[in-house]
Image (cartoon, rainbow, N blue to C red):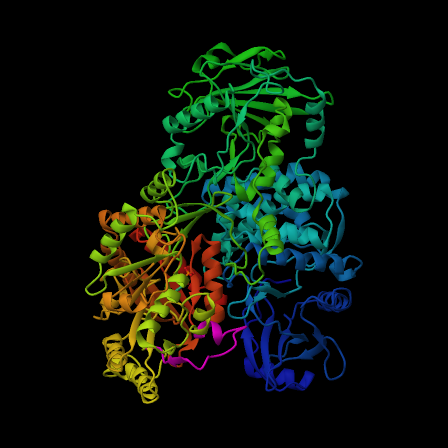
Amino acid sequence: MREAPVAKPITEFEAAEIARQLFGIEAAAHALAGEYDDNFRLRAADGSEFVLKIMHPDRERRFVEMQRAVLQHLATTAGELPLPRVVPSLRGESCVQTKVGDGSGRIVWLLTYLRGKTLAEFQPHTLELLEELGRFLGKLSSGLAGFSHPGAQRELKWDASRAMWIRDYLRYVEPLPRRMLAQRFLGLFETDVAPKLAGLRKSVVYGDANDYNVVVACSPGEAARVAGVIDFGDTHYGITVSELATATAYAILGKKDVLAAATAVVAGYCAEFSLTEDEIALIYPLVGARLAVSVVNSAHRKSLKPDDAYVTVSEAPAWEALERWARVFPRFASYAFRAACGLAPIAKAAAVESYLAKSGVASILEADLRTEPCVVLDLSVGSAFLGADPSSSEAAQLSAAIAGELKRSGARVAVGRYDEARLLYSALQFGASKNPTDERRTIHLGIDLFVEPGTPLRAPLAGVVHILANNAIPLDYGPLVVLKHVTDTGEEFFTLYGHLTENTLHALSIGQPVTRGQVFAHVGAVHENGGWPPHVHIQVILDLLDRGVDFPGVARASERAIWKALSPDPNLLLQIPAERFPKPSRAGDQLRARRKDLLGSSLSISYAKPLNIVRGWKQFLYDETGRAYLDVYNNVPLVGHSHPRVAEAAQKQLSLLNTNTRYLHENVVRYAERLTELLPDPLKVCHFVNSGSEANELAIRMARAKTGSDDIIVLEHAYHGHTNTLIDVSPYKFDGPGGSGRKPWVHVAPIADDYRGPYRRGEKNLGEKYAAHVGEIVETLRKQGRRATYLAETLPSVAGQIVFPPNYLAEAYRHVRAAGGVCIADEVQVGFGRLGTHFWGFEMQGVVPDIVVFGKPIGNAFPLAAVVTTPEIAEAFANGMEFFSTFGGNPVSCAVGLAVLDVVRDEKLQENAKKVGDYWLAGLAELQKSHELLGDIRGSGLFLGLDLVRNRETREPATAQASYIVNQLRQRGILAGTDGPHHNVIKLRPPLIFAEPDADLFNTTLDAILAEDAAQP
Ligand SMILES: Cc1ncc(COP(=O)(O)O)c(C=O)c1O
């Protein structure tokens, strides 16, 4: 067939005419891009859509017949798959031979149209979506299993078994390194695939699941789904596994982690359609060959038609993917694919493990750990032995801590665990990058034996010295030895010993036999062993993956299963009794299940995929695998997670005295002095409690003691705490799910929200207008002889990070006080410098409340809260009934409260909140220019809100998008949350040590997510 379109393309007008005449469809026609045929999208008046295919004059009928037959076959065998359906003509034909305007004879046929976007245009390609693509194609393969058609017997350049054709065309590829890369994959095809072709399973394959043929759809905020595949023009009889390999080749385009993307497709495919071990082993070379065919084909066609953009459409991403694919070690890929298909990643693993279990191993140390006591260390991410401060992992400190453990336990050997996630590996070679939330290598693949430097090591098994090297860069193996062993059934495996003495290397030579029990190495000291506390790292390796000295001792958590299969537990050699190992912590999904059993089901949990956070340090939280998350959500750890000064203050006081509050104690008085120094007159009388709820509850009792009335005025959507009274005064709760409505003594005033409320930014006297509503309520009550307590956050958070317009609180307080009422400021969210411009929220409004309530950040997550009031109200409250809170203001809480105030002052955190907050806001304002969804950006310092809208005019809340964005941020290592009555406000309230690079990371990540399909308005 000629590879050129006909001279005169069919017009849209003519296409519409053909559709009407042949198929009886009145529709507008839009030409679709295509190589040879004239294809049109038809949209009928009733909204139904079709693809009209007017085939190239040279197309054989058999070719169209075959496609029609495939689609009709799949409509019955895989009816659940959304695929184009063949629409018969008025005369009942599935393809019609007709003459068109230019006089040429054409085959015309009609298909239903699949709505969505092509995978190439869709963002993001999550692993879930790629897995679904795999499942789709697995079902397609099942559906095609029994299908045959003479038209499928074709000679096609895209047929995976014919990849060798590119050999003669490699010369078109420039420059040379690229030609060599394509050649390399051709070579792999020749050695690994070609000899197996005859024995491979064959069937009719669709064969063209490229990223422009896969259709994807999603609703706003929803996960994407595969909405079908189109263009069955490459359907042919070929090797069955090529269906998967072709899809995989295109699925890895544009991916940083090509293996993860490929594995997702393979896992999905195998879940629906079983592959043989031989087929799985050929996925890697077939993917490489497909990409090589694609780039060589492009190079050739470019030489024929240098200006044809269509030819080179996927050339650049294909080269990039090929380069990345070349960096994946073929056997490693096949282990990953085997695991994805439910097989043991490494076939020989069971043989080696049973050999190790049954062979008599010699003790590596003089102290035989089968009987000798040892102490097993916890060096995991959530280790209380290490704590959160990374300095505790440095060699000197860690050595001292381990020495302490040995002394305490009386053991001679300390053991570091296999398969333990650790944050000890901070050097670049472990994958540390500029982005602190990127996945690093954390999973320890060996066992460490911490012993004296110079300790001799014996070979556990007979073997041969295979590698001797000194990996001298800091935190690497230092001097290392790899021994090669062979099982009784001839399987090769290796044992690796790292952090040795340099002398060990001098005393051995490659190929030298080592007998079982022979001393062959010594444990190195810190100056020569890579900078670690003296220990030997022992690792079993089933396949060195041709990596030589560079075989990793630590793996990425996302590849944990494969690396564990490559390096099984060295305790097979050491045989340390199981009871010496502490019970391992449960993984997140196990904890989730137990939490569900044991804790109340009304207890909420964040994210579709909940997090198991085991460590916090500064503005970062870490899950059990060591993945770091930038915390832009938690306002409670005001001065940063696990601040050493706060922790030390609590520990010291807890080790000395903690008791109830009925005794004199310096701490409580000092703390009251420090707190009141920060507050204006007449807020000088403190009461300490343990939570924001307890504090608000107490504040209400005090106010009522003063007013003599139960009546409370609150704002719409407010939340003030979880006790009975506080639920009654929190519209967010009593008007929300499970709520029982407003009590008669509760009065709700409109929230002064100048973005969504009745009076909006730009109008005059906004504060006064909103406050007038408070005035009306006060007046109604006054007429009934009742006096009101006005309880409001100074910047409402749950209501959507609201900033009141100027004068609002001053006016509201004026109305309330004029009628003898009391004003409570709930500062639980915003106090202690967060706002940057002011230390307290009420200062922003230029008011002084009668009672102010503090919680959350006051103790940096230690249970402490306070109510501070005027002497007059305190006096009214002291009516004879004793006030006693057992723990409120205890010596430890107050020590913590003092430390928090010290840190805020000494680290100038209010100033930092102002500086970083302003910087962050400026960056967000830039994003707002290009993303319609960012309706309003508001707040002050490090208390910001992003109000997401579907339309800036109507301000329709973008609730689904907000939830999507927050979950995507979490996937990318940033923790944020949504709030507001419509759950469409992303609230940003990080610890006050948040820095400008953190703001940049948030903004660039948000920018990328806002461009994704599910985040569109
Ligand atoms: C404004 C406000 N007040 C009071 C509380 C209650 O504090 P706690 O949860 O410490 O009882 C909260 C908690 O979210 C709050 O946001």
**Image x and y of residue 814, in percent:** 23, 79
Asked whether 734 falls inside the magenta stretch, the response is yes
In this rendering, would 386 be left or right of 596? left
Asked whether 384 falls inside the magenta stretch, the response is no
In this rendering, would 264 be left or right of 505? right
Q: Which residues are magenta?
A: 731-753
For residue 728, which quarter of the picture? bottom left
**Image x and y of residue 136, in percent:** 66, 60
Residue 930 appearing in the image: no
In this rendering, would 896 be left or right of 315? left
* Quadrant (top left, top right, bottom left, bottom right) of the N terminus: bottom right
Q: Please report the residue visible at 28 percent of the width from the left and 81 percent of the height from the top.
A: 771
**Image x and y of residue 584, in percent:** 58, 38
Q: Please report the residue visible at 68 percent of the width from the left and 44 percent of the height from the top.
A: 280
- In the displayed structure, 726 sits above or below 266; it is below
**Image x and y of residue 713, in percent:** 36, 78
